[in-house]
Amino acid sequence: MDLLDTLTAKGLRRELPTREEALAVLATTDDELLDVVAAAGRVRRQWFGRRVKLNYLVNLKSGLCPEDCSYCSQRLGSKAEILKYTWLKPAEAAEAAAAGLAGGAKRVCLVASGRGPTDRDIDRVADTITAIKDANEAVEVCACLGLLSDNQAERLKAAGADAYNHNLNTSEATYGGITSTHTYADRVDTVNKAHGAGLSACSGLIAGMGESDEDLVDVVFALRELDSDSVPVNFLIPFEGTPLAKEWNLTPQRCLRILAMVRFVCPDVEVRIAGGREVHLRSMQPLGLHIANSIFLGDYLTSEGQAGQADLDMIADAGFEVEGAGQVTLPRHRSDAAAGGCGTSGGGCGTSGGGGCGPCGSHESADGSHESACGSDESACGSEESATAAPDEVRSELVKVRRRGAGTELAPNA
Ligand code: SF4
């Protein structure tokens, strides 16, 4: 179809699609779905070959957050029966990280609940980074600690952090509907702080919170403008005990269209399938690998993923290969720009010339659950797409609260 030929050609040139083209991807039918995946797959292979980057989450501090992000099982007032614990000691975190690295991960994501770190928290995380890197010099470490104050990004960079994650999550227009304790602008500011400190930017979204197609396109265009090196795409995990527990709006087909739209808008950045992969893509996960070039290995922050070995088997069965520690994730034009200081000069994803190359998202992303960005407006809840598959029924049995790994006596899943 003309649309997919156009989007493929633009992706291969790192050229920004129009909003109408991005929206049209989300409106494709199930009959067109494999063509959409194939087109996005061509763009993926151009920039990332058949490599899959594995990332490993270590939840340094779980639950008891004073913020009210509606999608989050760790939020203020959450009734979700998740693990709750305070800061892991550096050695404990390093032990958890080592399990992920032994399983094939090349990046460790250190995540802590909370509005943002204190200076003492930065010290703790610095000690943790040291403990991890002492054992494995080649590992990439991404910190995800919430909103950053002045100079905290610089301190993390000096401590050895490679990246910072802080997600935009949803469009600016709907942000106030999911969180009242901080703003979309706060999130953009933190991404820019991290980027300005020379940390690699990781910032993504959560789909399935009741947002419209326009909201999804808005947030992905905003992420491109931020010039993140990696874009985690979370699919809401509707935890019982959170305001979004009944928001089961996604189908595997819808998830694939969303991933494809992200790939077309940000063709040369690391697109990561994040929280909700098993819950929403289910048996269609291998098709997701044709679009995204990165996933989390094993478990998420407060929920369990499939067995780490199942992740590895899936990658091999689908004909992909795990990216090695010695391989550079990003295409040359981006990695060279990053090595020269991330600034605003280059690299961006394509020709957008995006202003900040901001670091990344926040902890919540990995367990992504989001609230009714559009509240009770059911028309916006995915049912308006022209695709033929109906939204999911409530599938609470698919959400498994994490009971192993960090914060427990049981071995991590990796
Ligand atoms: S997403 Fe982060 S800041 Fe928001 S409630 Fe969850 S832990 Fe707190």
Image (cartoon, rainbow, N blue to C red):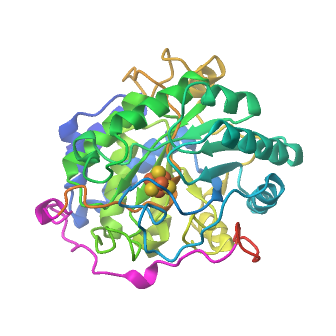
Query: In this orientation, which residue lies closer to the viewer: 20 or 62?
Result: 62
Does residue 90 appear left or right of residue 335 in this picture?
A: right
Does residue 347 appear left or right of residue 28 in this picture?
A: right
Whether residue 9 is visible, yes or no, is no
Q: Residue furthest bottom?
A: 397
The percent coordinates of residue 34 (x first, y second) are 34, 61
* Above or below: residue 254 compared with residue 94: below
- Residue 392 colored in magenta in the image: yes
How many numbered badges does the structure rendering display? 0
Query: In this orientation, which residue lies closer to the viewer: 139 or 281?
Result: 139
Q: Residue at x 70, y 36 (%)?
A: 161
The percent coordinates of residue 345 (x first, y second) are 49, 14
The percent coordinates of residue 239 (x first, y second) are 41, 73
* Above or below: residue 172 compared with residue 69: above
Q: Which residues are magenta?
A: 376-404
Query: In this orientation, which residue lies closer to the viewer: 392 or 92?
Result: 92
- Residue 201 colored in magenta in the image: no
Q: Quadrant of residue 224?
A: top left
Q: Residue furthest right?
A: 134
Q: Residue at x 33, y 51 (%)?
A: 179
Q: Quadrant of the C terminus?
A: bottom right
Q: Residue furthest top?
A: 345
The percent coordinates of residue 197 (x first, y second) are 60, 23
Does residue 275 appear left or right of residue 236 in this picture?
A: right
Q: Residue at x 52, y 79 (%)?
A: 400
Q: Main secondary structure of the magenta part?
A: loop
Whether residue 295 is visible, yes or no, is yes
